[in-house]
Image (cartoon, coloured by chain):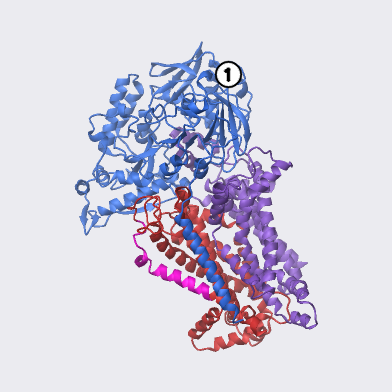
């Protein structure tokens, strides 16, 4: 009980610190949101002095000193009212986030689960069939594929399958003519649009899971109880799957938990290359345009979910491996 | 970490003890090197890595032209004079590729070393200390783990401005050490309960000595593995940051080559090599490190050595 | 096991070899990119690359917000269009603009114009609009109320009283886009109003809107309906260079690498026109030594090979700029004929050295050394991500190295770059000058002490901190004369000062990157018919949309 209480206390403290960091980090960047807005406008032609003034009034130099702004921000965090985005003025932050979140959750979330399941299975297989091509192919292929820069894989896939062979759409999350909702046309179109980003993330993340599982599995396969089970005449397949794999999957589960927590952040580079309207793209836009309200909301969301995942994994570990509690 | 009666790391203790007893670091290195070399995958990795290192060192001699000279015809296809063509600004792609190896190798090694050093220091003390000290470290590490990485990199890059290689290394290290610390802490915690540590405690050794003389050597593989892992992600992060235009586009590196390729739409103008070659090189370099890690895994965990199966 | 390893090695070698070969094969062949128009778009529909949603578009059609969709320009028309290419004022919702005295502007409102919901457009709408901007200064993006004192309606006329003598102000005020009183008077907070269902006077109305694309349909009630031949406009949210080249766009505004080899090659009816849209220049910080010395600035200027700088920046598609502040050939008619060679300055390292000597800098061991014996190092500030500027700076770095100057490049993020400009926190900064279409505005924004702010205080113009009573006097005279000949003479004098004093150093012209397809429509602006700039995102787009004719193929 004391263990759990201490953990909760620590969680709250970390949450506060992260929230505070999220407030100060954006403000460390030189230049104000007005400067960012003008920089964007000035790419279209000369920005006159009058325009500068108008934008300044519009976005408003945040009221009060930093402390007052900070208190104001804490209030926003508690009430979940993040106000109006600077970049997408006058759209409310909540609206932008709720538009982008489903796409990221479904795309990145599903792919993370699929990658974990496939990677783990392939890892078990590789360890079990060690030394054969069933080992060499996934391990070598996986490590090679995960060594490619995300965006590079994305660019090549986009160019060949999108532009040259025209098999998949080149941007967006669904067809122009579809109306988002629970209708077959939209869901079908959304699925087709998600293929290339999904494949990119899958290719580049699969290798990690394969290698992780393979290595712990090989360790476990050599353990005495496995040898013991084999000596007792259990089928190798049963030994591998029932005993070894179950034990070996533990450390990978923790990584999986953390990866799931990180899903909310989306995949900035992939979403950018494919023009996919998810959280990652929104985050990049917010950061490069110094959109404090949007950045704060997104950072908070990501921080909380990663923290929670981290916390749950910690608790889970404490339950599964009592030694760490000492 | 798995609940196993007999532990792989415990099994290797005698081996590492002889290592410690050995007079010079040379033997340690030879031993490590030969273990890695005995693994086929790792051997291939070492060969690829050495190749890149040699290219990086002798880049000025190997490059046929000055990599930032813009005196050639723009967007040329591959030819005898320019094996990989020229860029939209009229630079020789091959010379840039060769020059770019320097940055990637350098960033990989330095950032890998730095973040591993931090991870080792923090991870080990975190795993060993108990009470509020552990909580403080836990707090700091968690903070770095939960703040989203890429946006954090962008913010830091914007803050530091004039992004050069130094800045990129700093950004990669700041955002990259926490994960390794976490992994090393788990292993330390695991080892802390082992008999040989208990024995050391009873024999009255100081905690620092226990951590760095008793526990650390047992984690060689994890640390070396962490180094190669950190170097790999540093190389990829550097490329990603530069691709997003957050580095200094004037430096010639594989990341900036990809930035310029995307910027001048190399796919559209048919400058295949400009997009292909740097990406492939990044992938090969990163793969070589991953391959070496196969050998490193076998270092303190003989079960991951390739001979294991044959011995069985 | 021992039979195992070599086999695996062979397999690995094979994999690596295969990868290497495939990479080589791909390097050798280039894939031809062809433009294929979207068959679902009719021959009466223009596909326009202009409005980039990132990545999805918000439904914002409030014309006074910087985030307004580009389509707003086709619905909310100004009183007159200032043609930024020719410098002419084209009467639009005001059929006539008169300036009876330097403190008054009279707009005679056009008869027979209807809002797209059928209501009549009246002078009251114009008065309402000005009142709206006065009450909500954040909407006054053009800054009309900086010059205005009051507005009154007299019959068909809207009379604007100015704060003082200010003839050039008319060109700012006339650009105000007019909104309907009967709708906007009911809006609670116009500063956050998104105007999702816009009603305007323009040639198009909003059609189907989705976050990834929207369409506009011809306004049947438009007052020049006979001049509008394109029935629909389509604005997709994604307009990458690859999209523009491959997806059959009719009109785009974007720089494309190797435009001849890509855009023109993709379809025989694709054309392009890149007229100058501004002068990319170096702003010297005139409060700092040695940049406050005109001889030093001349030295820098003579050490520049502007042709090479421009070529590096825009792949040879843009011309070098002269030192008159004028955009050529657009403003040929306004150019001071007394300035030699149209203001072009040819690189001459010897002349440069003599000017540097006058400023107290001499060459020692190949380095330019000041009187204190220290070698000269200059920092040029440019925005990170503006790659054309960076290319230019790289070229300048090499050229100045030849005369012994070491150049450092500072590349803050765009917002931080803006901050550096405003605070005067730079030695030399890259920037764009001119291109408003008004000679007065171009010089005033850059040179007027009205915008002067001390270093560390934020300036909104005149970033180099130039101060000259002579220029201020000329600008004041400019404000009070309605005589075109006199305006021209004043322009000449300003150009002469710009040429002699180098308050900023012109490098090359920034382009207006017009991409057109003549497949469905002809009559695009071009070098032969330069009636306006190719911009898609300002009121001059109306000039193009009312100028297009169906091509022979689609008739």
Quadrant of the rendered image containing residue B220: bottom right
Where residue A319 sits: x, y (%)?
76, 69
Chain at tag 1: C
Q: Which residues are magenta?
A: B43-68
- Check disc 1 and report the residue beneath it: C221
Left or right? Give the position of C288 relative to A223.
left
Quadrant of the rendered image containing residue C438: top left
Relative vertical location of residue C247 with respect to residue B23 in this rendering, above or below: above
Q: Write down the colour of chain B.
A: red
Q: Write down the colour of chain A.
A: purple
Relative vertical location of residue A225 with respect to residue C350 in this rendering, above or below: below
Q: Secondary structure at mark 1?
A: loop
Relative vertical location of residue C211 with respect to residue A191 in this rendering, above or below: above
Residue at 75% in and 65% down: A4
Residue sitting nearer the eye, A53 or C271 = C271
Residue sitting nearer the eye, A109 or C37 = C37
Q: Within 10 Å of the Cα at label 1, are there few (<14), some (14-19), or many (20+) other Cα atoms?
A: some
Where residue C307 sits: x, y (%)?
30, 43
* Magenta portion: prevailing SS class: helix
Quadrant of the rendered image containing residue A234: bottom right
Any magenta on residue A249? no
The chain whose colour is blue is: C
Residue sitting nearer the eye, B295 or A258 = B295
Where residue A141 sits: x, y (%)?
59, 66
State whether residue B207 appears in this view: no
Residue at 62% in and 68% down: A137
């Amino acid at each position: 009980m004391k263990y759990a209480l201490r953990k909760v206390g620590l969680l709250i403290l970390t949450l506060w610190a992260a929230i505070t960091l999220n407030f100060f980090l954006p403000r460390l960047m030189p230049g104000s949101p007005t400067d960012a807005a003008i920089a964007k406008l000035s790419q279209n032609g000369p920005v006159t002095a009058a325009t500068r003034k108008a934008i300044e009034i519009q976005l408003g130099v945040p009221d009060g000193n930093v402390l007052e702004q900070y208190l104001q921000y804490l209030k926003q965090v508690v009430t979940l009212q993040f106000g109006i985005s600077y970049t997408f003025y006058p759209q409310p932050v909540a609206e932008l986030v709720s538009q982008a979140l489903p796409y990221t959750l479904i795309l990145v979330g599903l792919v993370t689960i699929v990658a974990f399941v496939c990677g783990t299975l392939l890892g078990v297989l590789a360890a079990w069939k060690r030394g054969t091509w069933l080992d060499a192919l996934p391990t070598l292929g996986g490590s090679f594929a995960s060594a490619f820069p995300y965006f590079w894989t994305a660019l090549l896939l986009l160019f060949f399958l999108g532009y040259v062979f025209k098999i998949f759409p080149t941007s967006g999350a669904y067809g122009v003519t579809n109306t988002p909702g629970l209708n077959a046309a939209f869901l079908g179109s959304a699925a087709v649009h998600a293929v290339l980003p999904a494949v990119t993330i899958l290719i580049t993340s699969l290798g990690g899971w394969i290698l992780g599982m393979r290595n712990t599995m090989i360790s476990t396969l050599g353990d005495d109880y496995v040898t013991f089970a084999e000596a007792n005449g259990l089928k190798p397949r049963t030994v591998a799957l029932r005993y070894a794999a179950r034990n070996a999957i533990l450390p990978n589960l923790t990584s999986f938990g953390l990866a799931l927590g990180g899903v909310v952040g989306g995949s900035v580079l992939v979403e950018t290359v494919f023009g996919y309207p998810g959280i990652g793209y929104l985050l990049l836009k917010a950061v490069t345009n110094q959109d404090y309200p949007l950045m704060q909301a997104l950072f908070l969301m990501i921080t909380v979910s990663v923290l929670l995942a981290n916390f749950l994994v910690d608790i889970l570990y404490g339950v599964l491996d009592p030694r760490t509690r000492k | 970490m798995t609940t196993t009666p007999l532990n792989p790391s415990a099994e290797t203790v005698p081996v590492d003890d002889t290592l410690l007893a050995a007079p010079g670091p040379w033997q340690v290195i030879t031993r490590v090197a030969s273990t890695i070399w005995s693994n086929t995958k790792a051997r291939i990795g070492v060969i690829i890595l050495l190749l890149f290192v040699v290219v990086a060192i002798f880049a000025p001699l190997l490059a046929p032209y000055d990599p930032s000279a813009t005196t050639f015809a723009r967007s040329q296809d591959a030819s005898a004079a320019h094996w990989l063509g020229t860029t939209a600004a009229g630079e020789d792609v091959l010379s840039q590729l060769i020059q770019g190896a320097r940055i990637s190798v350098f960033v990989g090694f330095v950032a890998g070393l730095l973040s591993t050093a931090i991870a080792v220091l923090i991870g080990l003390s975190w795993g060993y200390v108990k009470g509020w000290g552990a909580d403080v470290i836990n707090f700091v590490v968690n903070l770095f783990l939960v703040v989203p990485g890429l946006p954090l990199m962008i913010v830091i890059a914007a803050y530091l401005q004039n992004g050069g290689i130094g800045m990129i290394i700093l950004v990669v290290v700041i955002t990259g050490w926490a994960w390794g610390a976490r992994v090393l802490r788990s292993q330390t915690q695991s080892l802390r309960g082992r008999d040989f540590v208990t024995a050391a405690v009873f024999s009255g050794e100081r905690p620092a000595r226990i951590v760095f003389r008793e526990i650390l050597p047992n984690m060689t593989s994890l640390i070396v593995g962490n180094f190669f892992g950190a170097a790999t992600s540093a190389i990829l992060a550097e490329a990603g940051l530069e691709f997003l235009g957050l580095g200094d586009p004037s430096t010639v590196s594989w990341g900036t080559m990809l930035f310029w390729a995307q910027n001048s739409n190399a796919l559209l103008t048919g400058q295949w090599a400009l997009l292909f070659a740097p990406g492939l090189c990044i992938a090969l370099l990163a793969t070589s490190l991953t391959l070496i890690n196969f050998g490193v895994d076998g270092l303190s965990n003989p079960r991951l050595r390739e001979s294991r199966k044959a011995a069985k | 096991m021992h039979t195992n390893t070599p086999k695996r090695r062979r397999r690995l070698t094979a994999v690596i070899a295969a990868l290497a070969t495939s990479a080589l094969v791909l390097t050798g062949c280039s894939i031809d990119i062809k433009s294929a128009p979207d068959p679902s778009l009719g021959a009466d529909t223009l596909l326009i690359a202009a409005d980039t949603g990132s990545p999805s578009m918000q439904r914002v059609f409030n014309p006074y917000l910087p985030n307004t969709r580009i389509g707003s320009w086709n619905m909310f028309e100004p009183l007159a269009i200032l043609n930024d290419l020719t410098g002419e004022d084209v009467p639009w919702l005001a059929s006539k603009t008169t300036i009876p005295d330097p403190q008054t502007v009279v707009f005679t409102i056009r008869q027979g114009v209807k809002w797209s919901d059928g209501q009549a457009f009246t002078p009251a709408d114009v008065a309402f609009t000005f009142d709206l901007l006065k009450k909500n200064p954040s909407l006054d993006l053009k800054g009309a109320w900086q010059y205005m004192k009051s507005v009154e309606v007299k019959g068909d006329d809207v009379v604007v009283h100015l704060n003082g003598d200010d003839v050039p102000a008319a060109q700012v005020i006339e650009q105000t886009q007019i909104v309907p009183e009967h709708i906007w008077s009911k809006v609670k907070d116009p500063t956050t109003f998104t105007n999702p269902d816009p009603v305007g006077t323009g040639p198009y109305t909003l059609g189907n809107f989705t976050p990834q694309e929207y369409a506009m349909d011809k306004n049947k009630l438009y007052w020049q309906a006979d001049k509008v031949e394109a029935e629909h406009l389509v604005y997709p949210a994604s307009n990458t260079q690859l999209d523009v080249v491959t997806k059959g766009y009719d009109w785009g505004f974007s720089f494309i690498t190797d435009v001849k080899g890509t855009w023109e090659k993709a379809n025989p009816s694709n054309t392009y026109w890149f007229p100058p849209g501004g002068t990319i220049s170096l702003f010297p910080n005139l409060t700092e030594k040695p940049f406050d010395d005109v001889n030093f600035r001349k030295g820098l200027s003579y050490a520049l090979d502007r042709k090479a700088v421009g070529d590096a920046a825009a792949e040879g598609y843009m011309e070098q700029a002269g030192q008159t502040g004028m955009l050529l050939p657009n403003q040929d008619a306004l150019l001071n004929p007394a300035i030699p060679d149209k203001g072009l300055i040819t690189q001459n390292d010897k002349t440069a050295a003599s000017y540097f000597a006058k400023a107290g800098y001499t060459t020692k061991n190949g380095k330019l050394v000041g009187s204190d014996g220290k070698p000269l190092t200059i920092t040029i500030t440019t925005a990170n991500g503006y790659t054309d500027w960076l290319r230019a700076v790289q070229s300048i770095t090499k050229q100045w190295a030849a005369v012994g100057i070491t150049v450092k490049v500072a590349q803050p993020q765009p917002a931080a770059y803006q901050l550096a400009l405003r605070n005067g926190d730079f030695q030399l900064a890259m920037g764009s000058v001119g291109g408003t279409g008004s000679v007065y505005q171009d010089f005033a924004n850059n040179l007027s002490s009205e915008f002067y702010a001390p270093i560390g205080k934020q300036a909104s113009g005149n970033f180099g901190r130039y101060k000259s009573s002579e220029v201020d006097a000329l600008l004041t005279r400019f404000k009070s004369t309605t005589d075109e000949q006199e305006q021209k003479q004043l322009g000449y004098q300003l150009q002469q000062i710009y040429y002699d004093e180098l308050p900023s150093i012109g490098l090359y012209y920034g382009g207006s990157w017009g991409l057109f397809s003549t497949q469905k429509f002809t009559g695009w602006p071009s070098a032969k018919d330069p009636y306006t700039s190719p911009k898609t995102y300002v009121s001059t787009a109306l000039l193009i949309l009312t100028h297009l004719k169906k091509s022979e193929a689609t008739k």
